[in-house]
Image: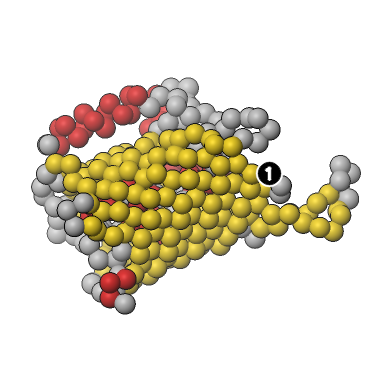
């Protein structure tokens, strides 16, 4: 399969993605899953290879994992919100590649109060959880496919809801060994249990991207379109949901990263002072047995997020 065919597939998906999703749901936490490397690159990772945590963006990517087969991420969010994710990849001879992954968010505790704002002295919690199982294999020369079946649970005080969804993706590695093209459809599913009889399905997302390692310069450039299934007045408005990311290699062990996400800057930044909203940066330390990654992202003036990820080669332990 050549590059022209891949472009035709991507174009077809984009044309068919008009206004598939338009509502808020209890499962919106799925839209913010990220490890430190992905956050530093502003989410422009749908075509990244050899990274177990990219399974959350494109399940086809796990076929390219060579060494670090385990990844764990922790995020200290605003207020007392904490979240993280875990992924593990394993190659099965003559069968393909499988992965198990987990995502969690603890939204902290909330005070009970009556309709006049008087506190009762007791508290309640709110938590999000999703776990999935992925499979990937080669479809054609340099073309990989993958899918994830996942289950989600959301609880708020005495109420709870659940859902099941599927992720699917394609990853194509060009023959130059420096360029990759990725496409994924995420969170396509249905709610299993409802709150108050209201049906609220997971937030479907369509992503497409490309990356290229420059020749003669140790830089990996990443570009991605995302949220392509969101409702917009015009199709061209979808193209505003883009991310750019660069990964610069310093020697053998250090990677410096920076990114820009246009959607975050457009939605969360104030018109009077956009500042560095939408800008991200990070650092990666790469060794034989483990990788350590850090990312800083800014969501407006009040939200500065720090992520920490660790990737290991469990076969070495």
Asked if 77 appears above or below 208 in the picture, the reply is below
Residue 38's image quarter?
A: bottom left
Q: Is residue 217 left or right of residue 280?
A: left
Pick the front one: 177 or 233: 177
Please give the residue where the numbered disc 1 appears in the rendered image.
159
The answer to whether residue 4 shows anywhere in this view is yes
Q: Is residue 13 left or right of residue 214?
A: right
Q: Which quadrant holds the N terminus?
A: top left
Task: Please provide percent x and percent y for residue 228.
Answer: 40, 33
Q: Is residue 157 left or right of residue 37?
A: right
Task: Please provide percent x and percent y for residue 149.
Answer: 39, 44
Pick the front one: 112 or 75: 112
| Count of marks, rendered view | 1
Residue 111's image quarter?
A: bottom right
Instruction: Give the colour scheme shown.
Output: secondary structure
Residue found 28% across the figure and 75% down from its top: 316
Task: Please provide percent x and percent y for residue 205.
Answer: 42, 37
Q: Is residue 285 left or right of residue 39?
A: left
């Amino acid at each position: 399969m050549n590059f022209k065919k891949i472009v035709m597939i991507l174009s077809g998906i984009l044309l068919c993605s008009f206004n598939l999703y338009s509502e808020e749901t209890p499962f919106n936490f799925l839209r913010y899953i990220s490890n430190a490397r992905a956050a530093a690159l502003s989410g422009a990772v749908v075509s990244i290879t050899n990274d177990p945590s990219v399974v959350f963006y494109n399940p086809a990517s796990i076929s390219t994992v060579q060494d670090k087969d385990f990844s764990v991420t922790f995020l200290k969010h605003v207020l007392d919100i904490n979240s993280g994710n875990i992924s593990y990849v394993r190659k099965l001879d003559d069968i393909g590649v499988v992965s198990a992954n987990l995502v969690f968010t603890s939204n902290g505790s909330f005070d009970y109060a009556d309709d006049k704002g008087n506190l009762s002295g007791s508290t309640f919690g709110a938590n999000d959880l999703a776990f999935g199982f992925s499979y990937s294999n080669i479809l054609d020369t340099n073309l990989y496919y993958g899918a994830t079946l996942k289950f989600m649970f959301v609880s708020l005080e005495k109420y709870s809801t659940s859902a099941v969804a599927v992720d699917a993706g394609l990853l194509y590695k060009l023959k130059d060994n420096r360029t990759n093209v990725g496409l994924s459809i995420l969170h396509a599913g249905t709610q299993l249990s409802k709150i108050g009889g209201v049906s609220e399905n997971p937030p479907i997302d369509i992503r497409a991207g490309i990356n290229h390692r420059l020749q003669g310069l140790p830089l990996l450039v990443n570009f991605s379109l995302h949220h392509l299934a969101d409702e917009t007045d015009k199709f061209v408005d979808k193209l505003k949901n883009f991310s750019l990311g660069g990964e610069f290699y310093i020697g053998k062990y250090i990677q410096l990263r920076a990114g820009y996400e246009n959607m975050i800057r457009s939605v969360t930044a104030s018109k009077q002072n956009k500042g560095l909203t939408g800008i991200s940066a990070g650092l990666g330390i790469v060794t034989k047995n483990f990788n350590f990654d850090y990312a800083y992202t800014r969501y407006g003036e009040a939200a500065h997020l720090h992520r920490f990820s660790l990737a290991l080669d469990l076969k070495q332990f």
